[in-house]
Amino acid sequence: MTDGYVTADGRQIGPVVMEMKNITLRFGGVEAIKDISFDIRQGEIRAIIGPNGAGKSSMLNVISGFYVPQEGEVWYKGAPRPSMKPYEVAQQGIARTFQNIALFEGMSVLDNVMTGRLTNMKTGMFWQSIWKGKAEREETANREVAEKIIDFLEIQAIRKTPVSRLSYGLKKRVELARALAAEPSILLLDEPMAGMNVEEKEDMSRFILDVNDEFGTTIALIEHDMGVVMDLSDRVVVMDYGKKIGDGTPSEVRNNQDVIDAYLGVAHD
Amino acid sequence: MPEQLAFTIEVFLNGLMAGVLYALVALGFVLIYKASGIFNYAQGVMALFAALTLAGIIDGQVPFSHLINAILGTDIHHFGWHVPAFLAILLTMVVMIGLAYAVQRLVFRHLVGQEPIILFMATIGLAYFLEGVGDLMWGSDIKSMDVGLPQGLNTWIDDTTFNAFGYGFFIDNLDIVASIIAALLVIGLVMFAQYTKQGRAMRAVADDHQAALSVGVSLNFIWILVWSLAGFVALVAGIMWGTKSGVQFSLSLIALKALPVLMLGGFTSIPGAIVGGLIIGVGEKLFEFLIGAPFLGGATENWFAYMLALIFLVFRPQGLFGEKIIERV
Amino acid sequence: MAHTLVSADGPQSVPALLHRNAKQFANAPAYREKEYGIWQSWTWAQTRDEVEALALGLLELGANEGDFIAIIGRNRPYLYWAMMAAEMVGAVPVPLYQDANAEEMAYVLDHCGARFAIVGDQEQVDKVLDVQNQLTQFERMIYLDPRGLRKYDHAALDQYSAVQDMGRKARDKHIKELEARQAKLDYDSTGVMLYTSGTTGKPKGVVLSNRNIIETAKSSSAFDKLRQTDDILAYLPMAWVGDFIFSVGQALWTGFCTNCPESADTMHVDLREIGPTYYFAPPRVFETQLTSVMIRMEDASRFKKWLFDKFMAHARRVGPAILDGKSIGAMDRAKYALGELMIYGPLKNTLGLSRVRVGYTAGEAIGPEIFDFYRSLGINLKQLYGQTEATVFITAQPDGEVRSDTVGVTCPGVELKIAENGEVFYRSPGVFVEYYKNPESTADTKDAEGWVATGDAGFIEESSGHLRIIDRAKDVGKMADGSLFAPKYVENKLKFFPNILEAVVFGNGRDACTAFINIDLTAVGNWAERNNIGYASYQELARHPQVMDTIQSHVEEVNASIAEDEMLSGCQVHRFVVLHKELDADDGELTRTRKVRRKVIGEKFDDIITALYDGSPSVSTVTEVTYEDGRKGSIAATLEVRDAKVFADTRKMAAQ
């Protein structure tokens, strides 16, 4: 068993933390994912790419527990994961963002980031209600983590601003902050650059790389913008029509004939 | 001080006290509506049910005694003890939490993602069901409620105002206590929502279900939590109303008074429920005193609140504090 | 040397002042910084310890007396301490503009021959690493924020806190040496070297002695009665002499507290939270704040706006007089007090200026209505006139004698004289020692008797004794008919309109004046939004006919007011264009302090100037631009040239 590898830029990648084994997902008669297997290793940036409708989002939703596959198993930290609710998956240390942004619009940025800490709060409801001693200490510690992340993502200036008043690009960043606040072992990003202009995309890429570098967070992201992905990720899974058509380093994938065909739109037969 | 002015102030104060109770019932609606989008028609019946249960437990009544006697041919009605009020309130709360759990587990869990109208119909069903169960459990006779709250004329206010203005204000001790308790309850709820983990999770669910799931919040747990909180609020309202006018079926009708309060304050706003309740309480009492009784032949209290709500619906459909309704294309 | 004042008593160096404060104000706050959402604070005693630890660390790294240590980054307590630590070890701190490009940075680092640089974060580390191979004497870099730097080669790179730890460990080894080096510092040793941004040519290193720093801090603190309990917000570039004197010189002298914002973006929030009592901002900042207030009032409810207008009108009438301590009727006073309660107080609080006791603006002329707006609110905003070579202070307005068109009376210890051509000269204890490695420039600027040429033309108003500045001395020229040409005077009048961000007036040696205009995107953009005018870019908005009409009316208004001035009536703007791009420091059109570089602009937009004078109705041009990341591109545009109405000199007409 090989335990990890070293990336082109010299980062040590660890053992497998998550493995998808022969996943098949159907909606009624439609097969959104057909018998797909791949793994995610500790500390790497893993991308899932493919044209629109390839099943990328479905894959992410399987990982985060929003969809339950009809066949196949998800292995997490060396054991098969039983069927779980999305909130239970989140409690296991898998945080995610959404393509269309799902923030708590009525709350401030800080409150949003603090909700990311919910899974890390252990104090029971009784102490929470009294809100003294233990609960108070916990609140302070959590606030510290939240503030470090706010600092890291450079959103101090909007800390107290209600999310509904922010621009699209900033909302995406706040959503990333909330996911990071959970100190996740795997961070799932659903099209983090969708709808952004060039400058915002560059910022977001930098933040993703910085997060991985600074916190060693394992990141799995889906994206249909090939260029961005190739610069960011260590290994790439390529999907098309629900099937896996490629898996490897960006340069391997780039030279894969099936991938080239899929992106150039060669007719499927 | 001219007498007319003194009367008006007295009416105003009494209106304020009545308003507090309206606000309390409306609060129960808002809690559930915000977190789950369900308009809970059964809120009034929950108050009745809570009051019945509390009165029954205090009295040491045997639940379902009619049923038991009919089936087994026995003739038991009472355990023969009296439960202290504090303990009885705790026990009632446990019953209300059990009810919340059962409602979520047996009814609404199966209705996730259904149209609001379906959910609303389900709460109507729940209301009739609860009313029936209440009857069956505790009997249909009118009960008195006594948990040791002070009642009757507050002599201190009476004396002081008499000495000051030459006219003694009639203010009921129960109203004063009710106002204080309601205020504490509201402050407590707001602090809970603002500063605790569960409160934060509750606000998260109220804001966006999908996002709440992604940060590890169990929707089921939060729904049980808000139904329990609504049950707690219903219990408090039931105690107040029951102490004042006895535990009887008409108690469930206070839910209807909460409707105009919600239209005024907005369905999603906790401060709205409070301000709306106070406005309606004061408004209907003052209107009756100043206009209704002298010019309209009285009894305006029955319809004033609805008329006010109607006016509001025309000019500000989202209520005083409600979020602006924007139709998105 | 012809210094007029020599103080023999009291601390004679910046480190000596620090030691005095650590004893005298041991537990008073010296520095605060907002980090992770909380204000962290250090007392004077703690500050001394932090500085000393860093100084000992620098000794361990081998810093020598006379070395130059570059300091680059945004305002942070740690970097102020770095300056003090440098002085402690007998080295000279050289703060650099953090937004300088690599070329500018390389020039300065090479010119002073810095051996060390103490920098804020990765961005600056990268910049210095980029140019390091051009530098012969550069050795090591110390950084504050470790983010993103973990994988860098640390052979010549240390973290700030690691250097301090190093220093604390080596205390016994170096403390004697450190004390000895500090004992050698006196009034004549160099305290700091600051590079002037320079409107022309390469930056020059202005050497300031401890005398310059301490004497200036002492007299200016006395002039404005600064207190130990005062608070300032340090947000202007650390390389600028003003920030050095406020945040180091005066802070050390009076022992007040310097507060650093969390980041540039949070400046306004932090300003509100700190509520400084002593505050400096360039006119641009006051202008931006006023614009944003006005924009918000446009969106406010009708009642609120009515209330605002009503009370502001009253404030304009009596506010400045109340501030100057003149007697005002009881009714007006009562109405002003009501306004304070309802409008002025809340507004000052929003602006973060409610505690300001002494406020200054300088660097550029400030629009009279902007200036009066703040004063009418009861904010003691004043003007000063100064430059790096004078250690800031030349003239300043005393309390109670404040006007928007003068720059005040001479500061204590300053002498002033006006040359025949109108150029202003001064002499003071703050006069700089020299330009580093540039004796010719030093001689050009400072004569043997210590008089320094300011390069500004001005005159002393007879009635008040206040100095008035017209323009840069070399920019004051002659028109073809021999009449006076003062471009800046006209440009300032144009810039007082909120819609106009920048203006450049031409006309030296010509028959008539013409102008380039930059619109203010915030103000004009807001107007466009209110009037449902869509636009995709600055360029599109700038050439909108209605915008052109508005600008034309502004130009004509200015012409009318210039026509009233006999001396300058020839400076009326006959033709103008609204430029297709904003003038930018990255393109070399402005200095880093946003002063217009007339010559560069004249050469770059030669074709447009030709069109302004040959009567053509429009001109097509292509301009090269530099983006923020250093890439270059170009924009093409066709500009409309407009004629503006000019007015005959009203007084001359009357005389005829």
Image: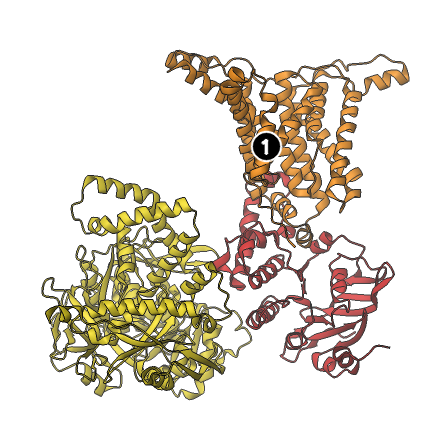
- Where on the picture, by quarter, is residue C498? bottom left
Q: Residue A80 or C655: which is nearer the viewer?
A: C655
Q: Nearer the viewer, residue C74 or C182?
A: C74
Specify the chain shown as orange.
B
Residue identifier under label 1: B309
Quadrant location of the C terminus of chain C in the rendered image: bottom left
Tell me the quadrant of the picture where the N terminus of chain C can be found: bottom left
Q: Which chain is yellow?
A: C
B134 relative to C95 in the view: left or right: right
In this rendering, does residue C500 appear at all? no
Subunit bearing disc 1: B
SS at circle 1: helix
All told, the count of numbered labels is 1
Left or right of residue A103, residue C207 in this image:
left
Looking at the rendered structure, the kind of residue marked 1 is Ala
Residue C537 position in % (x across, y down): 49, 71
The quadrant where residue A168 appears: bottom right
Q: Say which quarter of the image contains residue C609.
A: bottom left
The residue lying furthest to the front in this view is: C656
Q: Which chain is red?
A: A
- Front one among C411 and C42: C411
Query: How is the model colour-coded?
Result: by chain
Does the image show residue B47?
Answer: yes
Placement of C255 over or under C342, stated as above or below:
below
Task: Indicate the position of residue C329 as horizontal and vertical percent values.
Answer: 18, 42
Image height check: is A25 above or below A264?
Answer: above
Instruction: Answer with left or right where residue A201 lies relative to residue C251.
Output: right
Outermost residue toward the right?
B72
